[in-house]
Amino acid sequence: EVQLEQSGGGLVRPGRSLRLSCAVSGFRFGDYAMGWFRQAPGKGLEWVGFIRSKPYGGTAEYAASVKGRFTISRDDSKSIAYLQMNSLKTEDTAVYYCTRENYYGSGSYAVYWGQGTLVTVSS
Amino acid sequence: EIVLTQSPGTLSLSPGERATLSCRASQSVSNAHLAWYQQKAGQAPRLLFHGPSNRATGIPDTFSVSGSGTDFTLTISRLEPEDFAVYYCQQYGDLPFTFGQGTKLEIK
């Protein structure tokens, strides 16, 4: 059974940093891209970014709203994906979801989703 | 960036009725890389279709999709109580990947 267990959310002051983790089981982590999405309270879904698997270069792509502030990484030895969030803004307040993606060289869609973790940016 | 516009914003129907949800893109979706997700209140989204007409595991055949290019449709042929939720389309062919604003399917 595929499981994505998220951790690391919480309340943080504007300008500070936070790191989210996504520990997975039930599939070969190194074979898959991993994604991050978010949903502000009462709003729709927003793509944050994704990281390719090592066979596809292990590189990441980001939404313009987070590029330069957020970094997606992965530790294939631990089967964990990370979302490092720096210079947080109040508009980053949202439930953040990690996903297991299907990516085969063009395009990436989310097949499995974590339970979500709330990040609140407030002074 | 590709803008996806979903309509209607809210659809009020009764169990047993047919639902038709639209997703229109501001430009052609590359390689038909369009997905549909269902989200129930307080839950993570669930993949329904990708590519655009490949049904995800466990999705009943009362759900179907059609369309290409810039116009896509999700149809639920006969609504069950558990189908009332918010539905999102997403294009994943061109960066940045984008979502429509969602269609809320509510019980009439």
Image (cartoon, coloured by chain):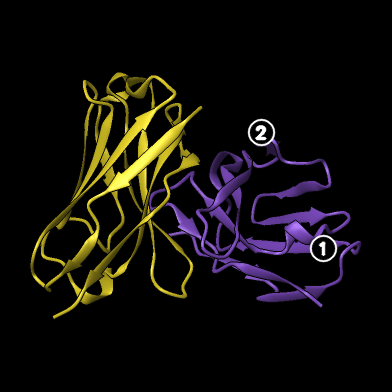
Chain colours: A yellow, B purple
Q: Which mark is residue B57?
A: 2
Q: Nearer the viewer, mark 2 or mark 1?
A: 2
Q: Residue A71's x, y, as percent? A: 18, 47
Q: Residue, x 31% and y 56% (percent of image)?
A: A63
Residue beneath label 1, please?
B19
Find residue A14 and report its image quarter.
Answer: bottom left
Q: Chain ID for label 2?
A: B
Q: Chain ID for label 1?
A: B
**Total numbered badges shown on the rendered structure:** 2
User: Where does the N terminus of chain B fall, quadrant-wise?
Assistant: bottom left
Q: Residue, x 80% and y 55% (percent of image)?
A: B75
Find residue B105 and report its image quarter.
Answer: bottom right
Find residue A120 and report its image quarter.
Answer: bottom left
Task: Looking at the picture, tell me which residue is in the foreground, B44 or A101.
Answer: B44
Above or below B11: residue A16: above
Above or below A92: residue A97: above
User: Where does the C terminus of chain B fall, quadrant-wise?
Assistant: bottom right
User: Considering only order in the chain, which callout, 1 or 2, is on the residue closer to the N terminus?
Assistant: 1
Helix, strand or loop at label 1? It is strand
Dot 2, how many residues are within 10 Å of its Cα: few (below 14), some (14-19), or many (20+)?
Answer: few
Q: Residue, x 79% and y 61% (percent of image)?
A: B81
Q: Amino acid at mark 1?
A: Ala
- Left or right: residue A33 versus residue B84 is left
